[in-house]
Amino acid sequence: MKKPRVQHRTKSPRVVQELSRLAAGLAASGSRIEDAFWENRLAAKIHAQLRTGDDQNLEAALDQLYDTDSVGYGEFIYAIEAAIECGVLIREGIGHDVLMFAAPVLTWSRFSIPSGLISEPVLASLRVQLQAHVLAKDVQFVLADCLFSPDQLPRGYHLTHELANKLWTAAVAGERDLHINPRQLAETGRFLSDTRYLLGAIAVPQGKSMFRWQEADGSGTDKSTHPLGVKFSKQDTLLAWQTHGTEALRPLFQGCAFELVIPDGFFSAWRMADRLARPYSTHATIDFLQSTLNISANRLRAVIAPFYDQWLEEYRVSFTLKDRDEVLYGIVWALVGDEDENSDTVTQIETTLRECGITHTTVLDNHFLLEYCEECGAPLFPNPEGEVVHTEFPDEGEVAPVHLH
């Protein structure tokens, strides 16, 4: 997630050292009881930093741990995310577990992909389907009345935490919707394939189930049961959500193809969407090229190349006609999670391309630097000769220019 630097504050070496020490202690813990000791102290320090409205000490501690303690780094990331997306709120003397959740939607269209305010009828339909097929029985939950693009998600840890707090408070109070002022949201770029996010919060009495897959009998407002009477799994929930949630969202996505990702805790859903968006965008791009140029996929060639900053950041995949070198379009296959140079990412890309009908693939082993067009800011892509160029549609297939995620 993009995290803007706050210029009017300076980081505290003492705070950074203490955050790093607590995360390293948690990483080295040898028991559940010791885990709780470190987790409680680390959570208190993280919350204190979130209240300052400044991410610099958290970022500096992450940088330090990345260089010195990879396990501590992972524990610290998890602790920050937990502090942001979940907590306990007290209302009228009753403690509530609260969670900010996201329901991502992968989508593509030749036309504009929607974002912004969601009408009340669509919100009402979404609430019914979430309650029936995703959430545990009798939870209180609230939805933000906005369909967020990636550019419109909060930028930075403390801003995400501020939105989570608003959603938690509304959920505990029994409200149904949280209004988002569209004028305060960033502009949304035009992309062929992109992700949209429904955001909300769940509130339950402490220790109770939040999601349907947590319930012992898989019960919800929908009384259907899994074969053999076993509880619903996440996969069962996903299939039900994709079936019924798709119909609820269809009015928002006129002229778009779209696919629902399982609703989950904000950061988990966000990462899952990032992973799934890569093959989804590849399929969308090839479908677009086939239909626009009126050709079959086997007339296309893909060029795959790694791009580096200080280390490997992403692969860029160019598409050309099989017998030409001009790059028609390109997609960015970013590394996510713990993927790095040792991951078998190229095989994943080639497998996805074959699924789409691309049989001609060139893999370049050059170390390309991250380069972008100076005029429009779009990423530059490799041609078969190993040169980094701007995408350029052929004369016989001119269409309105769009960039690809």
Image (cartoon, rainbow, N blue to C red):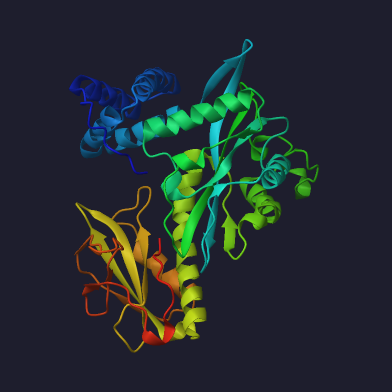
Give the farthest residue toward the bottom: 323
The one nearer the camera, 121 or 241, is: 121
Instruction: Indicate the position of residue 21 as horizontal and vertical percent values.
Output: 26, 23
Give the farthest residue toward the top: 93
Instruction: Indicate the position of residue 90 as horizontal and vertical percent values.
Output: 58, 15
Q: Can residue 148 be seen in this view?
A: yes
Instruction: Indicate the position of residue 189 as horizontal and vertical percent values.
Output: 41, 56
Instruction: Indicate the position of residue 14 as horizontal and vertical percent values.
Output: 20, 19
Residue 27, compared with residue 396, is above or below; it is above
Residue at x 57%, y 35% (from the top left corner): 179
Residue 183, compared with residue 246, is above or below; it is above
Residue 92, compared with residue 229, is above or below; it is above
Quadrant of the frame with the N terminus: top left
User: For this view, does 26 lie left or right of residue 18?
Assistant: right
The one nearer the camera, 117 or 171, is: 117
User: For this view, does 147 lie left or right of residue 188?
Assistant: right
Residue at x 34%, y 43% (from the top left corner): 2
Give the farthest residue toward the front: 183
Q: Can residue 81 be seen in this view?
A: no
Quadrant of the frame with the C terminus: bottom left
User: For this view, does 90 lie left or right of residue 6?
Assistant: right
